[in-house]
Amino acid sequence: DKASGGGLEYLGDKMFENMREFRVLAKTLNFNTAADQLHISQPTLTRHIASLEQELGFRLLNRNPMALTAQGRYFLLGCDEVLSRYDEVVRQCKVIARKSSEAIRLNMPLSSNSIWGDIFYRAVPEFARSFPDTPVPYFVHDDFSSIGQSIASGSADVGIVFRPPDEDLPDCMCEKIAELPLAVFFSKSNPLKEKDALRFEDLDGQYLLCSSNAKLQTVFDGAIDALIRNGVRPKCRYRDFTDFDMVGFILEDDEIVFGNAANMLDPNVSAKLEGRPIDNGCARYPIYVMYRKHPEREKIADFVAICKRLATAIQAEN
C-alpha cells in the first residue's frame, strides 16, 4: 500500500502543497496562525495535514499539546531538502525553457554528405563563438511538414531549401546562397556508369527517386526543377524513407538521384553510388536559405549572414 512505500509515489502537486503547508505549521505550531500565513482557512489546513498524515502512514504532530512527533521532526528535515531541490529543478527548467524559446530553430534534410549540411554545421559553432551570450541554435525535427512549411508556420526559424516557395510569404525570406555543379548518382550496376559524363537526354528511361517524406521532399523538388529547367519531363518514383543516406542502399538500377558534383569525390558516397557530372554549362544545383523575419529577433539575421558567408566559401572550395 501507499504507506509501506513511504508515500513517495504520491509526490504530485498535492503532496508538494501539503509539504509546504506542513513546514509553516511546524514552525508556528498553531493551525490558526499557519492558516493565516498560508492564506487558507483553518479547516482547510487541518484537512490537508490530516490527509498528509494518512498518506504517509504516521502522525506528524501531537495535537494536545501541539508538538512535532519524533518522526515529524525528521520528516520536516526531509521536506526542506526535497522542496529545496524541487524548487531548484523547476527554476533550472524555466531557464532552459526560456533559452529554448529564444534559440534559433533550424531545419534541413539531414545527410552526412551534403553541402547544405556543411553550411549549417559550420554556421552553428561560429554563431556560438560570435554571440556567446545567445542560446546556441538547435535543430527541430518534423517528418510531417516540408522545410518550407515549417518556416512558414513558425515551427522553425531558418531552413535550407532547393527552390523558393510557390507563393510569397509576408513573414519569410528565401535567398539563393550557393549554386554548384550538378551531378547524377546511381547504383553501381546502372548502365549509366559506362559514360564519363552525362547529358540530360541520357537520362531518358531513368526514374528520379523521391521520398514520400515531407521533410526530404524539398531535396527532390530541387531535382525536379533541374530537370524541368533543362527540358526533361521527370519520371519519379516515391518511396518511404526519412534518411537521405539511405539512398545508396535502396536505389534500383533504373533510378537516379541528383546532387552536387563535389560529392563524387567523397569516399562515403563513392563507396555506395556511382556519380557523373552533367555536361551542361547551365546544369547547376541551387541552394537557398529560407528564414523568418523577426524584427525583435535580430540574431536570426546574424545567423543567416554567417550562412551566406560560409556558403560562398564552401562554393569556392568546390
Image (cartoon, rainbow, N blue to C red):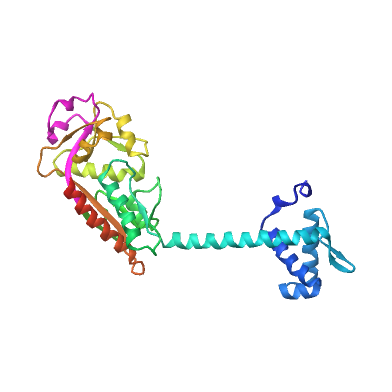
Q: Which is nearer the eye, 46 or 171?
A: 46
Residue positioned 35% across, 63% down in the render? 131
Residue 162 placed where, x, y %?
25, 48
Quarter assignment of residue 125: bottom left
Residue positioned 21% across, 25% down in the render? 190
Query: From this viewpoint, which residue is outermost toward the right?
Result: 64
Residue 208 placed where, x, y %?
24, 35
User: Does residue 54 appear to the left or right of 232 in the view shown?
Assistant: right
Q: Does the magenta stretch include residue 165?
A: no
Is residue 164 visible in this depiction of the protein?
Answer: no
Q: Is residue 195 magenta?
A: yes
Is residue 230 visible in this depiction of the protein?
Answer: yes
For the C terminus, the quadrant is top left
User: Does residue 309 appear to the left or right of 296 in the view shown?
Assistant: left
As displayed, is residue 38 above or below residue 81?
below
User: Does residue 44 appear to the left or right of 116 in the view shown?
Assistant: right
Q: Which is nearer the eye, 139 or 268?
A: 268
Quarter assignment of residue 185: top left
Residue 31 placed where, x, y %?
80, 71
Total of numbered circles in the picture?
0
What's drawn in magenta, residue-wise?
178-206
Residue positioned 75% across, 62% down in the render? 76
As displayed, is residue 124 above or below residue 218?
below
Residue positioned 84% across, 61% down in the render? 69
Residue 301 placed where, x, y %?
29, 63
As displayed, is residue 243 above or below residue 59?
above
